Image (cartoon, grey):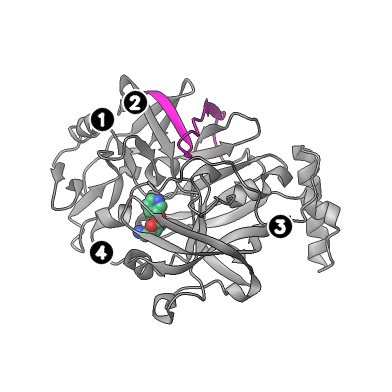
Amino acid sequence: MHGIKSIAAIAGLASLAVASPVEKRATPGSFQIKQVQTGQKLAVGAVAYQKAYQKYNKAVPAVVAAAAQQGAVTATPEQYDSEYLCPVTVGANTLNLDFDTGSADLWVFSSLLPSSEQAGHSIYNVASGKKITGDTWKISYGDGSGAAGTVYADKVVIGPVTATTQAVEAATSISSAFQQDTDNDGLVGLAFSTINTVSPKPVTTFFDTVKANLTSKLFAADLKKGAAGVYDFGYIDTTKYTGSIVYTPVDSSQGFWMFTSTAYSIGTTKTSASISGIADTGTSLLLLDASIVTAYYKKVTGSKNDSTQGGYTFPCTATLPDFSITVGGAVRTVPGSYMNFAPIDNTGKTCFGGIQSNAGVGFSIFGDIFLKSQYVIFDQTTSSPRLGFGQQ
Ligand SMILES: CNCc1ccc(Oc2cccnc2)o1
C-alpha cells in the first residue's frame, strides 16, 4: 500500500510506450474456446446452465462453457483509488493485476526476477508456460515506471473467460516504483495490440485473444470511488448506469481508445471546445489542457498551482465544482466530490487535485477520476471501435 509519498508520482501518466504499427500476429499456438452464436439471451442462459454444473462440482460441457464466455471480475482500488487491481490466474498462479486501457502488454512479476524484487508480490512461475524463443519486451509508462522481460505462452483466466494460450510477458526487471507497489503484480494491457512492445513482433492483448469467443466483442469498466467495482467481459450490465449509453467513435490509430468531446462544463458554465483524449484506466487522474485546468481551479477557493507538489492543490475542506464533458451529444458529469484525489501529507490539511494539466502528453487523459463516474464500454463489436458512456 502507498504511504504518503509524492502524490504526483502515484498519480502517473498514460503509457507513452508505443510500438511502430505492425500487422497483428496471432498468439502462439491456438486456444480451444469454440465460437458461439452471439446473443445476450443465449449467454445469460448458458451462464445459468454453467452455474448449475458448477454448483454440484460437475464438469461443465464445453459447449455450455463456451457459450457462457462472458462475466465479471472484481476491481479493488488501492488507497486514494490510485489504481485498481483484479485477480487473474496466469498458468498455475493467481496474481493481482492492474487493468490498463492505456497500454497493450500483459506483463507479470515472475520467477525470473531476483528474489529481492519478488518480495511482497504474487509471482508467475514460468515453469507452467512455453517459452516463446527470441521474444522480448520492454515498456515504460508516463509516470516513469517500467519493466522488461521475456515471453511465455500459458493459460490466462479472467473471471469466467479463459485464454488457453495467451502471450504472458514475464518480467526479468522492474522499476523501483513497481517494486514498492506491493499490491500490484503486473498489468493487463487493454489498449490496441498495435502498441504491444513485444519484439520482434507484437503479441495480442488478452481481449484481442478472446474477443472472437465472447458473447459480444466488448468489455466494460465499472470503477468506483473508494469501493470495489468490476470489469465485465462480453456483455453490458444494464443495471450499472442510469438513462442510456451514449456512444462515440474511437480513433485507434495511436493504439489508444481515443475519442473527442465537443464541450466541457465547470459547474453549470458550459464552454464549446474540441477535446481529444484517451480513456485510460491505468492513469489515476483526469489530465486536460492547461486552459481548462486553470479555469476549473479559479472556482476553488484557496487552490494554487504548487510546483513543489507537482500540480494544483487546495484546502482539503474546499468545495469542488462538478466537471462535465459533452460526448456523442450527451453530457457526462464527474461530481465535484470526486475531484479531491488525496491529501499531500499526513496532516490532511492540503489536498491534491484530481484534475491536472496534460502538458507534455499531447492529448487529454480521461483516467480513473473521470472513468469512475461512468459505466464505460470498450466496444469492438463492429470494424469501427467505439466507446460507450453510461452515467452512474
Ligand atoms: C505507480 N507507478 C507504478 C505503476 C502502477 C501502474 C503503472 O502503470 C501505469 C502508470 C501510469 C499510466 N498507465 C499505466 O505504473
Q: CA distance from mark 4 to mark 2?
A: 32 Å
The disc at residue 264 is 2
Residue occupied by mark 4: 4
Q: Dot 3, crowdedness within 10 Å: few (<14), some or many (≥20)?
A: few
**In the image, residue 246 lies in the stretch drawn in magenta:** yes
The vertical placement of 352 against 168, above or below, is above
Q: CA distance from mark 4 to mark 1?
A: 28 Å
Q: Could you tell me which secondary element the residue under label 3 belongs to?
A: loop
Residue occupied by mark 3: 29
Q: Residue at 20% across / 36% down in the picture? A: 297
Q: Could you tell me which secondary element the residue under label 4 belongs to?
A: loop
Identify the amino acid type marked 3.
Gly
Q: Total of numbered circles in the picture?
A: 4
Q: CA distance from mark 4 to mark 3?
A: 45 Å
Residue occupied by mark 1: 292
Please state the extent of the stretch shown in magenta in the rendering. 241-262
Q: Could you tell me which secondary element the residue under label 2 belongs to?
A: strand
Q: Nearer the viewer, mark 1 or mark 3?
A: 3
Relative depth, front residue between 39 and 212: 212
Q: CA distance from mark 1 to mark 3?
A: 48 Å
Circles 1 and 2: CB atoms closer than 8 Å? yes
The disc at residue 189 is none
The vertical placement of 172 against 309, above or below, is below
Whichever of labels 2 and 3 marks the residue nearer the N terminus, that label is 3
